Amino acid sequence: MSLTVTTRSGIANVTLDRPGRRNAMLASMWQALPKVMTELDADPAVSLVVLRGSGGHFGAGNDIADFLAHCVSVDQARSYAWAMAAAMRSVEALAKPIVAAIEGDCYGASVALTLACDLRVAADNAGFAITPAKLGVLYLSSDLARLSALIGPARVRDMIFTARRLDAREAQNIGLVDRLLPHAGFEEGLVEVLRSIAIGSPVTIRGTKAMLRRLSPGDAPPETEETIAGFVAATQGADFKEGAQAFLEKRRPNFVHG
């Protein structure tokens, strides 16, 4: 599964635990997240959840080899897309506060995972990039909605069209990061942020989360078969075949532009 859950003093750490692959997401990890979130929501010993990566990075996005293996057919690709959407929704729907603790690389689908959290706390060595244009795939529409609500549609276009890397300071300046901490002493600073949340009223925090979900115009709409269809079609196209192969061969993709 490659997810590790530990709880101490009311704080549950959910760790993406594939350090050798910069915590790149497997299909099994997307499938496991909803159950993890449901269990944490029901656990009276947990008041706050932290989502993080191991080995100095938050996450490199989807594991491309695993992604390829799970998107051979239209039905497989549809299942993969729904698994991702369900995982993001389970994080977003958590009644308890959930904080993304971000160090090092945070790319692609891993950025989408942080968008579903309530707050994004980053070390100053963090870097962010949304790279589907290098692979010939699409971001899910619900992920685009969350991203646009944070940084606005023009910056969404910039990030996705160029696939460029943003350093932690720029990410904070555009609203992608809520709190920026020095990498030296990141854990200590993070503990202070978490403690300030943990001592607050659960009634206030959970009630505020629930009201914001009802009131916020930026709430991500649920995926539908129609929105998933675009994602699925991209996985069956020539651009994805070229983009994925180029990624695995560590070269620049040669997309056909007409």
Image (cartoon, rainbow, N blue to C red):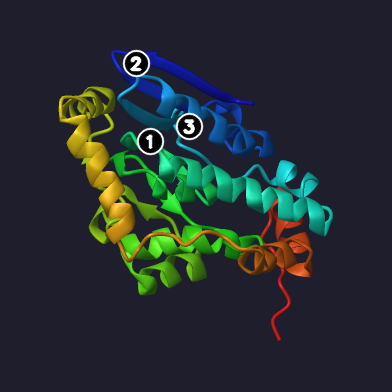
Query: With 258 as the anchor, is 130 left or right in this view?
Result: left
Left or right side of 251 for 94: left
Considering the image in quadrants, where does the C terminus appear? bottom right
Q: Residues within 10 Å of mark 3 (few under 14, many from 20)?
A: many
Alpha-carbon distance for marks 2 and 1? Answer: 27 Å
Give the SS element for disc 3: helix
Picture residue at 73% right of the left edge, 41% below the top: 66
**Where does the image place residue 236, in percent across and percent down from the top left?**
79, 63
Quadrant where the N terminus sits is top right
Residue beneath disc 3: 37
Q: Is residue 55 visible?
A: no
Query: Which is in the foreground here, disc 1 or disc 3?
Result: 3
User: Which type of secondary structure does the marked residue at label 2 adopt?
Assistant: loop
Can residue 9 be seen in the rendering of this structure? yes
| Nearer-the-camera pick, 215 or 185 | 215
Question: Could you classify mark 2 by the number of other residues whose Cα lies within 10 Å: few (under 14), some (14-19), or many (20 or more)?
Answer: some
Q: Amino acid at mark 1?
A: Glu
Q: Give me the residue at 42% from left, 45% from top.
A: 92
- Residue 70 numbered tag: none
Disc 2 and disc 1 in contact, CB within 8 angstroms: no
Cα separation between marks 3 and 2: 14 Å
Q: Position of residue 254 (x, y in %)?
A: 72, 69
Q: Looking at the image, tell me whether mark 1 or mark 3 is earlier in sequence order.
A: 3
Locate residue 155, reporting x and y percent. 37, 69
Residue 123, position in %: x, y?
30, 37
Q: Nearer the viewer, residue 12 or 250?
A: 12
Return the disc, 2 or 1, that comes first in the chain's sequence: 2
Quadrant of the image occupied by residue 138: bottom right
- What label sits on residue 103 in the rendered view? 1
Separation of marks 1 and 3 at Cα, in angstroms: 22 Å
Mark identifier at residue 45: 2
Residue in view at x 69 percent, y 81 percent: 257
